[in-house]
Image (spheres, helix red, strand yellow):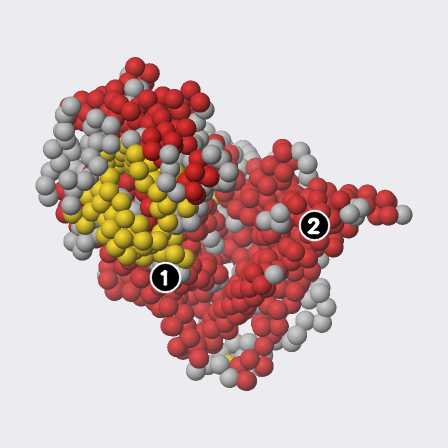
Amino acid sequence: MEKIEAKDVNFYYGSFHALKGISMEIPQNKVVAFIGPSGCGKSTFLRLFNRMNDLIPGARLEGEICIDGKNIYAPGIQVDELRKEVGMVFQRPNPFPKSIFDNVAYGLRVNGIKDKSFIAHRVEEALRGAALWEEVKDKLNASAYALSGGQQQRLCIARAMAVSPSVLLMDEPASALDPISTAKVEELICELRNEVTIVIVTHNMQQASRVSDKTAFFYMGEMVEYDDTKVIFTNPHKEATQNYITGRFG
Amino acid sequence: MKKFLEKAVKWLLTASGFVTSVVILLIIGFLFTEGAGLFREPVVEEGYVLALNRENPVSTLTAAEIKAVFDEDVTNWKDLGGDDMEIVPFRLEDADKYFTQEQLGAQYEHAGAAIASLVASTPGMIAFVPGSMVPEGADLNLIEDKNISAGEVFGGKEWFPTATPAPLFGILPLLAGTLWVSLFAILFALPFGISIAVYMSEVASPKVRNFLKPVIELLNGIPSVVYGFFGLIIIVPLLQQVFGLPVGESGLAGSIVLAIMALPTIVTVAEDAMRNCPRTLREASLALGATKWQTIYKVVIPSSMSGIASGVVLGIGRAVGETMAVLMVTGNAAVIPTSILEPLRTIPATIAAELGEAPAGGAHYQSLFLLGVILFFITFFINMCVEFISSRGRAKNS
Amino acid sequence: MSTPAYPKDFSMKKRRSQKVAFIVFRVLSLLIVLILFAILGFIIYKGAGVISWDFLSKAPSDGMTAGGIFPAIVGTLLLMLGSAIVAFPVGIMSGIYMNEYASRGWVVKFIRLMTNNLSGVPSIVFGLFGMALFVKYLGFGDSILAGSLTLGLLSLPLVIRTTEEALKDIPAGIREGSLALGATKLQTIWKVVLPMGMPRIITGLILSLGRVSGETAPILFTCAAYFFPQLPASIFDQCMALPYHLYVISTSGTDIEAQQPIAYGTALVLIVIVLVINLLAGVLRRHFENRLKMK
C-alpha cells in the first residue's frame, strides 16, 4: 500500500485557488522531492500532510489526503495524533530557546512520555541518528542557540525524529545553510530513508536529483509531472518540466 | 540664509531632544534641595527648648523618646537612662495648673522665670517652652538640640509629622504601606493580566481581539480619581460587608483598585511580547504533536518572558506611584500594616494629603519632598529594571 | 531503535487541559470587560440623571451642595489647552530630533532612557516638582500657568514617543527620494516626513490630551482651586478642574446626601471626555489608515 495518497486535492486561501486538482501517491520509505518555482504551491501542498495549514484563517481544502489509508481530514482525526506520525523540518532552523537536550526531548514530553531514562536514551538515539551526538554530547544542557546554523538544523531533524514519526516532511531544509552543512543534511536524508518516508520541498534541483527517488514538478498550483527522479531529470514528458530543469525559467 | 535656517533649526531640535533629560535633572535638583533641608531641621520644634532639672543626668533624647514622654507612654527616667524617678511633663498649656494668673503676669512676662523655678524645684520635670522665655543663666539643664538624623527618618517606625514637641518622620510605615498595597495589587493583576494577554494574542479570533483591545485602552484612559470614586462607592462598602470590617477603607480596597489600574499596562506589554514570538517556533512545537496550549506554556510564554516581566515591572511602577485612587480608598492610617484588611497609607497618598497643610519651608514640608525623592528613586529603579530586562530580551532574540 | 510507547489516553488529557485553560482565559477576559462596563455603566446610570443644562453651565453654589460644574469644565479645558501649548511643540521637535537628527547610537539611547524614566515618574512627583519650581521658585503662584506647565511636562514623554514611532515607520527610501531631488534635510522633513507622519502624531497627541484631562495629583498644589466659582481672568489665576472637583466632593464633602449626585455627574462628565477622546483617536486612526490604503 502507498504511504501517502492525495486524491484530487484543491486548496484555497480565501478566493485564491492555490492548489488545483492534485492527485499523487507516495510510496513507503522513499524520498520524494517537490520542485518548482516559488509560489507554485509545493510548500502549501507539503503542509497539507500534517495539517499545518489549519492555522491559516480562510483556508479551505477539497479532496482527500490519506496516510496509511486513513483520510487525515476526516472528522474525528486528532491533529496532534497525526503530527506525532508526520514530523516536519522547516526552512530555517527553529530550535526552541531551550537546552539541546530539552529541544530533542520536547516531542516526547508533550506527548506524555515521563520515563526519564527512556527520554535520555531516545534523545541520544535521535542525536546519533542526526549525526550530531559526537558534537554535542558534552554540552547537552547548553542552549540550542549556541550551535551553528547547520548544527541547529540537524538538531531540528533529531527533534522531529525523536518522536519516531513514519513520515518526515522537509520544507527546503537546506536553503539557509552553507554548502558543507547542506551536504551533511543531504547525507542524513539518505540515511533516514530506511526509517521514514520523506517528502522534501526544494528549490535546488541538484539537491532533488541527489537525494530523491521520485520527483514532482509543480507550476502555478498544478502538479505538472510526477515520476522517478531519473526520468524527470533526464527525460521529462512535459515541456514545462524540461524548461524548468534546464533553467529556462524559475 | 537657507543654510543659517537649517543650522538654527538643527540646534533648536537638538535642544528639545534633551528636554526630558533636563526635566529629570531639574526634578532631582528641586526635590533634593527641598527634601535635604529636613536634615538641617532641629528635632524639637524650631524656637523651643526642652528644659530639665539641674540634677537630671539625661542630656539627649531622640524624637521618638520625646514623643513617648509627652504622650506619657514612658513615665520613668530610668527607661531613658536617667535615675529612678517619675517623669513630669510640662507644656505651656499646663501653666494654669501650677500658677495663678498674677504669678504669670498679664502679658505672661513672669512666666519664664516662674517656669524656670518650677523646673528647678521639681526633680522629674521636663518642660517644653519657647527658648526666648527661658531666663538668661537659669539653673536648668537643656536637652541638647540636635538635627533630625537620617537614621530616625529611614529607620523610624512612626510617621507623626504634626506631633509636638518633636514631630516624627519615620518613613517605614509609609514605605511598608506602599509596597504592601503594590505587592497585593500585582498579585491580583498578574493572573488576570497574563491570562488576558494570552487570550488576546493566542486564542481569541481577530474579531474578539479587536473588541478587547479598545476595552483595555479605555481602562487605561479612565482617570484615577474616577477609579478612586468607584472604589469608594462600590468596593469599600462591599469589603466592609464581606469581611465585617469596622471600616472598609483598607489596603485590600487599594490593592483591588490598583490591580484594575495596573492591568492595562501588564496586558499591553505582555501581549506585545507574545505576538512577537516567532511563528516558526510555534509551528515547530505544533508539528511535534503539541497542542496549542502546550505550545503556549512551553514555548510562547518562556520565549516572551522578558517582555512579560517588563510588563509586570511597569505595572508595579504604576501601582507604586499611583496617588489619587489610593488616597481615596486606603484609609490613610500611617501605621506599619499587619494585615491587608487594615487601613494603611502610601507615600504618594501622604504627599497628596499633607502637602496642602504643611507650612512651606518647615520640617513637615521638607519631609514630604524627601518622600518625593524616595518615590522618584523607587520608580527610577523600577524603570531601570525594565530597561535591563527588555534589553536582555532583545539581545537574546537577535 | 527504540520506539516510544505513548500513553494511550494522553492525547485526550492534553486536549482536555487545553479546553480548561482556554475556558479560564475566556472567562477572565470576559470579566475584565464586565469590570469596565460595570464602572462605565454605574457612573453613566447614576450620573445621567444629574446632567442638565444647568449642571453644565452653572457654578457650584450653597457650599458646593447645589449648582453645576461649569467652572470645573472650563478649568479642565484650559489646562488641556495649556499643557498642549507647552508639550506639543517641544515634544514633536524632540521626537523629530531623535528620529531624524541624532546620529550617534548612544545619544538616542540616552535620550530614550531619560524619556522612559520621565514617563515613569509618578504624577504626584510632578506635582511636587511643579510646586517647587513654578509656584515657588519662579513665583507663578497657584495658577493656570503653573498647572499647564506641570501637566505639559507630564505629557511630554508620551508626545515624544508617539512622534518618534510615527516617524520611524516612514520608509527611508522616501527621505532619500526627496534628498536625491536636491531638497535639504529640513525641507525633506517639513515637506515629506512630517506630513506623512502627521496622522499618527495627531492621534497620539489627542490621546495625551485625554491623559491630561484626568490627572489630579499634578494640579493639587500647582493650580486647582477647591472653590472658585467665577471664571479665571488670566493665566495667573487659579481654576477649578473636574478631577480635583470629583476628589474634593467625594472625600471631604460636608453634606454627603446633597453632594453625591454632583459627584456622579462630575464623574460622568469626566468619563465622557475620556470616551470622546478615545473614540476620536480611534476614528482618526481608522480614517488615516484607510486613506493610506487607498493610495
Q: Check the residue under mark 1 and report the chain it is in.
A: B
| Label ID, residue B384 | none
Residue for badge 1: B208
The percent position of residue B221, horizontal first and vertical second, equals 48, 61
Q: Do tags 1 and 2 sit on the same chain?
A: no
Quadrant of the drawing holding the N terminus of chain C: top left
Q: Looking at the image, which residue is at 60% across and 52% down?
A: C166
Q: Is residue B147 visible?
A: yes
Can you tell which of label 1 and label 2 is closer to the viewer?
Answer: 1
Is disc 1 placed on a helix, strand or loop?
helix
Q: Looking at the image, which residue is at 25% across and 26% down?
A: A192
Callout 2, which amino acid?
Met
How busy is the neighbourhood of tag 1: few (under 14 within 10 Å), some, or many (20 plus)? Answer: few
The percent position of residue A44, horizontal first and vertical second, equals 36, 46
Mark 1–mark 2 CB contact (< 8 Å): no
Q: Quadrant of residue B137?
A: top right
Q: Looking at the image, which residue is at 29% across and 24% down?
A: A190
Q: Is residue B234 above or below residue A170?
A: below
Name the residue nearer the viewer: A228 or A132. Answer: A228
Quadrant of the drawing holding the C terminus of chain C: bottom right
The percent position of residue B281, horizontal first and vertical second, equals 36, 39
Q: Is residue A227 above or below residue B102?
A: above
The percent position of residue B57, horizontal first and vertical second, equals 45, 29
Q: Check the residue under mark 2 and report the chain it is in.
A: C
| Label ID, residue C93 | 2
Q: Looking at the image, which residue is at 30% across and 34% down?
A: A228
Q: Is residue A124 above or below residue C30?
A: above
Q: Is residue B285 visible?
A: no
User: Separation of disc 1 and disc 2 at Cα?
Assistant: 38 Å
Callout 1, which amino acid?
Val
Is disc 2 placed on a helix, strand or loop?
helix
